[in-house]
Image (spheres, rainbow, N blue to C red):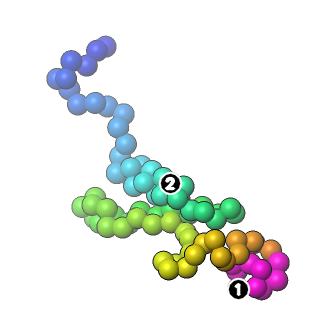
Amino acid sequence: MVNTGTKKRSGYLNWDEYFMSVALLSAQRSKDPNTQVGACVASPDNKIIGVGYNGFPLGCSDDELPWAREGTFLDTKYP
């Protein structure tokens, strides 16, 4: 059946799926070789309040700090 523009499209994302998709896309910005985590915070009226992903804090060069998961205290990013 061809939709001639008289009916709304079916099969679109619900709000939870939409916000989860935004979080998954945000996770792709992470430079961490081991873990990529994204987040999307939304209000009760379905407005995005914030989006983020795991990484070093602003102002810290991710080229100068270690990314290793295992090793000595100074050779990893984990305390």
Residue 2 x/y as whole percent: 28, 15
Q: Position of residue 8 (x, y in %)?
A: 23, 31
Residue 20 visible? The answer is no
Q: Nearer the viewer, residue 66 or 38?
A: 66
Task: Estimate how packed mark 1 is, as few (under 14), some (14 to 19) or many (20 or more) residues with alpha carbons within 10 Å.
Answer: few
Q: Residue 35, percent across and down?
A: 65, 63
Q: How many marks?
A: 2
Q: Quadrant of residue 37?
A: bottom right
- Viewer-closest of 65 and 77: 65
Q: Mark 2: which secondary structure?
A: helix
3D distance between C-alphas at marks 2 and 1: 27 Å
Give me the disc on residue 79.
1
Extreme-right residue of the structure: 71
Vertical order, 21 against 35 (above or below): above
Q: Which residues are magenta?
A: 71-79
Residue flagged by tag 1: what amino acid is it? Answer: Pro
Residue at image location 60% in from the left, 63% down from the top: 31
